[in-house]
Amino acid sequence: MWTSPAGVSLTRGWCAVTSDPARVVRAPTSAGEILAHVPLVREARRASGRRRLYLVGGAARDGLLGRPTADFDFLVKDAPEVAARFARTVGGRLVLLHEDWPVARVVVGRGARRLDFDFASPRADSVSGDLQARDFTINGIAAGPLGAHPRLIDPCHGRHDCSRRLIRMTSAAALEADPVRVVRAYRFASELGFRVERRTHRECRRLAERVRLSSAERVGAEMVRLCAGGSARRALDGMSDAGVLQVVIPELAPAVGMWQGGAHEYDVFAHSLLAIERLLTLIDQAPRVFPDHAGDVRAYAGHDERRAALVLAALLHDVAKPECRVWEGGRWRFFAHEARGAAVADAIAARLRLPKRMRRRVKLLVGAHMRLLPIMGGDPPTERAKRRLVRDSGPDITGLVLLSLADRRALTHDIDRDGERAVVARLESLLAVASEMAREPQPTRPVITGSDLIALGLEPGPVFREILEAVEEAWSAGEVETREEALQWVAERPGLQKDLENGREGDDGS
């Protein structure tokens, strides 16, 4: 329970039934039970006056499924007027969503306590007519009118499809009227753990090209929610089968059927989908896989935007392999595919108008997904190397660990459990370093420049960058903490420039 600015007592819908996500909650079975869990329902009814007010769409559906929700849609005549009266009563913020059609939103609270109440005027002569014009049958459900004897109104048999866990279109015309609904079908499948019904799937395939007519922002928003869903792997697989994924992310098309060879059992695209499956399993089984750091994993992946970025990075981590593939030494090689992939993933995220923070995270994860290979399969890493990895990855070191292990586990169908123990132990040691560094007071980064190096008597040149990187490593390892210490660290190594230049020449000649 919490209180609005106007002093009205609120709950977060049926998510207030229990605070334990593992506990099974009986879903409401009648309109009265559904409405009983809607916060501010009395205030909404009072604001509607003599007008008939109905709870419709996703809120009614989630009520039947017993799912938590913070978004409530109402159908009522003179919607903006009712919304304005409701906003004044509860101290909410009023936003007009559509000028061409009367829809208004009232936002109550902020952050995790935010609730959205949307009020829309009917588009048809009856409630049933309005529901039948919606996208999917599971969204064509209403509870109301609010009052003493509300009833469930279900002209599309959405309740039956809820019980069968199906995403079914209300009509082909409904999908065609708004092409973004083609993507939304698979987003709902991911969020709800449902499957797209066969005829709807075929219609999505027919309309796949029309998705290009939808705005990038709307398609991107659907993709974010799809990737954050618990059944993202299966939804993306179905979306690909319908040809919709190739329209949204055409860069993935060359990955389908592209053989990799070596340790890989699958083509690039199938491997990427399996990596998502392995990733979601790692998150679900975090207490067993990462017993000492399960809390860190759950905290990282429990945030919808981070989880979506992580899944999208898994989908795109090998997106550049087709263009980087070369035959060398009797096998296929993919030199620098992670660096090129980071650029491609960034371009995809930009095209889909994803949030800048999410875009940066996807780019970082794709670009760094090979950096943990030496830790997982080579000599044990030094503490300095671990600290540098943590410093470079920042808060996304947890995501990088999950992506790298999922990538490794997606090489083949079977997972070598015995061989994985040592790998997981090393990754846990990296997470331990990350936890330790997070608790340390963070020293100010010692900023020195090329001018400082010249003042120390060093010769200007490309090697300056390597010297400055060496200073960064020393700072990450805790060897220097201030600018003065950094300058002293360089000054005490008179042969540093020569050693770096000689080392670089040796690398070029090998």
Image (cartoon, helix red, strand yellow):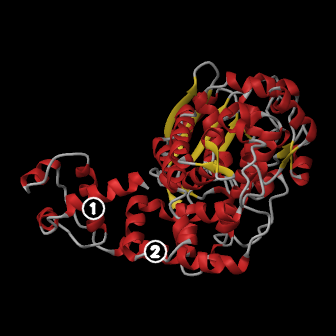
Which quadrant of the figure has residue 119?
top right
Sooner in the amino-acid sequence: mark 1 or mark 2: 2
Q: Is residue 178 visible?
A: no
Camera-side residue: 135 or 502?
A: 502
Q: How many marks?
A: 2
Give the class, few, some or many, for how many residues have Cα within 10 Å of label 2's Cα (few <14, many ≥20): some
Q: Residue at x 82, y 33 (%)?
A: 131
Task: Please say whether residue 434 is visible from this viewpoint.
Answer: yes
Q: Which residue is mark 1?
A: 470
Residue 257, x across and y down, in percent? 78, 43
- Circle 1 — which element? helix
- Image check: 350 left or right of 44? left
Where does the image place residue 463, in percent across and percent down from the top left? 25, 51
Q: Please give the name of the residue rendered at 41% of the width and 60% of the height, measured from the top-left corner.
A: 394
Q: Which residue is mark 2?
A: 381
Q: Quadrant of the C terminus?
A: bottom left
In the rendered view of the protein, which quadrant contains the N terminus?
A: bottom right
* Spot occupied by residue 85 in the image (x, y as percentages of width and height): 55, 36
Examine the rendered structure and indicate whether residue 108 appears above or below residue 351: below
Using the image, determine if residue 331 lies above or below residue 441. Answer: above
Return the x and y of residue 507 as percentages of the image width and height: 39, 56
Q: Quadrant location of residue 246?
A: top right
Residue 66 to residue 173: above or below: below
Towards the viewer: 261 or 417: 261
Is 212 on the left or on the right of 459, as rendered? Answer: right
Residue found 84% across the figure and 54% down from its top: 30
- Tell me what residue is drawn at x 63 percent, y 70 percent: 19
Q: Name the amino acid, label 2.
A: Pro
